[in-house]
Image (cartoon, grey):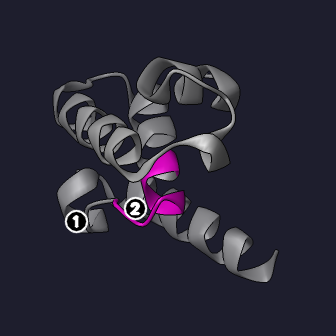
Amino acid sequence: MDFDDQLRRYFGTADIAALNPAALAAGTERMQVDLGLETNPGRRFALWALLYILGAAPDLDVAFKSEEERNSARDFMDMLDRA
């Protein structure tokens, strides 16, 4: 799942800075619902990663069943912290 595609799908634009607070909240809520329903690990991780960037991701133990997935998410979080 491409980052810009995710933004367009959930927010209607790739320019997230242009969103008003209500549109941001609505798109974030749709992403959270889709995260709970998604079964494909790659798409699930992509949804979680964008939610993390937006400050709306669930805890790792809620979002990911396996330790391997949680470790990948921790690596992603560390990478963002270093950037």
Most extreme residue toward the bottom is: 82
79 above or below 40?
Answer: below
Is there CB contact under 8 Å for labels 1 and 2?
A: yes
Label 1 Cα crowd, 10 Å radius (few <14 / some 14-19 / many 20+): few
Q: Label 2, on which residue?
A: 70
77 sits left or right of 14 in the view: left
x, y percentage for residue 61?
22, 65
Label 2 Cα crowd, 10 Å radius (few <14 / some 14-19 / many 20+): some
Say which quadrant the N terminus sits in.
top right
Residue 55 colored magenta?
A: yes
47 sits left or right of 72 in the view: left
CA gap, disc 1 and disc 2: 7 Å
Residue at (41%, 48%) from the top-left corner? 48
Most extreme residue toward the front is: 20
65 sits left or right of 6 in the view: left
Say which quadrant the C terminus sits in.
bottom right
Q: Earlier in the sequence, mark 1 or mark 2?
A: 1
* Range of residues picked out in magenta: 50-56
- Residue 50 is tagged as none
**Label 1: element kind:** helix
55 sits left or right of 65 in the view: right
x, y percentage for residue 38?
26, 25
Residue at (38%, 38%) from the top-left corner? 23
Residue at (48%, 59%) from the top-left corner? 54
Number of callouts: 2
Q: Label 1, on which residue?
A: 61
The three-letter amino acid code for the residue at tag 2 is Arg
Residue at (51%, 47%) from the top-left corner? 50
x, y percentage for residue 55?
42, 66
48 above or below 7?
Answer: below
The three-letter amino acid code for the residue at tag 1 is Asp
